[in-house]
Every structure is written in structure tokens, then in C-alpha cells.
Image (cartoon, rainbow, N blue to C red):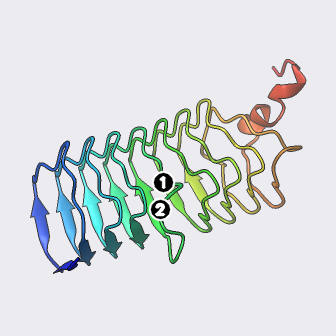
Amino acid sequence: MKIILHEEKTFNNIDYADKDVFNREFVKCLFNGCNFSNSNISGNEFVECQFIDCNFSMTKFGTASLKNVFFKNCKLIGVDFSSCKDFLFSVSYENCILDYSSFFKKKLKNTIFKKCNIKEANFTDSDLTNSVFQDCDLTLTQFEKTNLNGVDFTSSYNYNIDPELNRIKNAKFSIEGLAGLLTKYGIIIE
């Protein structure tokens, strides 16, 4: 099948909801206010693209390639990033909703999560080395066998991280957030 290439294009308010979008390569494209909810974008390649004010609720990313992709003010509820291609996988998020999303076994070194809601997400077996969670709500988000070495959690909150089940060397936490490391012990911190 022939791949359709889009370079340095801007897509404004396009409605891809409930549609299958295949055989596309997007390079340095801007997506503004687009709706991808319940769509299937598996197998497409996104290189140095930006998504602003887009809705990806329940979107199937499948084997999509995300290379240096930036999401801002986007809804990414229930998205499974775990099956995206690993080669050069690089994403960052600002002011996004990532509730119920999965990053199972994903390599996410140096990833920026800024002012995001990341409730009940799954980071099991992922590598978040030197990533930053800045002002993020991590309520009921799962960290298990996760590499959190060097991760900055200092301004984030509502996390529950078991130091015995995760690698946390040089990770940064605020004094107020330390309770999130001690939850399993059932102790009361006042």
C-alpha cells in the first residue's frame, strides 16, 4: 500500500471520530482542535508533530510511531500507548488528561508531563528515567516494577509508589508527598 505523506501542514478542526486513518506519515504537522475520539490511527507515523486542543478519547494508537510528538490541552482518556512502536518513541504532554491510559513496558526516558491529570493510568514495567511530572495529579496511577530513577515528582500529588517494587534512586519528592511512598505500611502521618 502506498503511504500518503503530509509535511508541514496544519489541520484545523478536522473530525476523525470513529474513523480509521491508515497509511499516513505526518512530518512537522500541527493538529489544532481535531477530534480523534474512538478512531483507529494504528500504523501511522507522526514525526515532530504537535497536537493542540485535540480529543483522543479511546483512540486506538496500535502500532503508530510517535517520534518527538507534543500534546497540549488534549484529552487522551483510555489511550493505550504500550503497543506504539518503540523505535525513537518520544512524547511530551502539557495540560492534558491522560486518565486510564496505559504506558505498560514503554520506554519514556526524559518525558515531560506538565500540569496533567494522570488518574488510574498504568506505568507498570515502564522506564521513566529522568522524567518530570510537574504539577500532575497521579490519583490511583499504578507504578510497579517501574524505573523511576531520577524522576522529579516534587510538584505532583496523590501518587502511591511502593519503593520496594520500583527503582527510585535519585527520584525527587516533596516533603508533603512522602506519604505517597509510605501508604502500604498503614501508618498515620500528621
SS state under label 2: loop
Location of residue 92 (image quadrant): bottom left
**Of the pair 146 and 134, the residue shown nearer to us:** 146
Residue at x-position 50% and y-position 57%? 83
Name the amino acid type tagged 1: Phe
Measured Cα–Cα span from mark 2 to mark 1: 5 Å
Q: Position of residue 77 (x, y in %)?
A: 39, 38
Q: Position of residue 55 (x, y in %)?
A: 26, 45
> Badges 2 and 1: C-beta atoms under 8 Å apart?
yes
Callout 1 crowding tier (Cα within 10 Å): few <14, some 14–19, many ≥20: many
Asked whether, in this view, residue 91 is left or right of residue 173, the answer is left
Q: Where's the C terminus, which quadrant?
A: top right
Q: Which residue is mark 1?
A: 81
Q: Which residue is mark 2?
A: 84
Residue at x-position 59% and y-position 63%? 108
Asked whether, in this view, residue 68 is left or right of residue 7, the answer is right
Q: Which mark is residue 94?
A: none
Residue at x-position 55% and y-position 39%? 121
Q: Position of residue 26 (x, y in %)?
A: 25, 74
SS state under label 1: loop
* Image height of 142 relative to 24, above or below: above
Name the amino acid type tagged 2: Cys
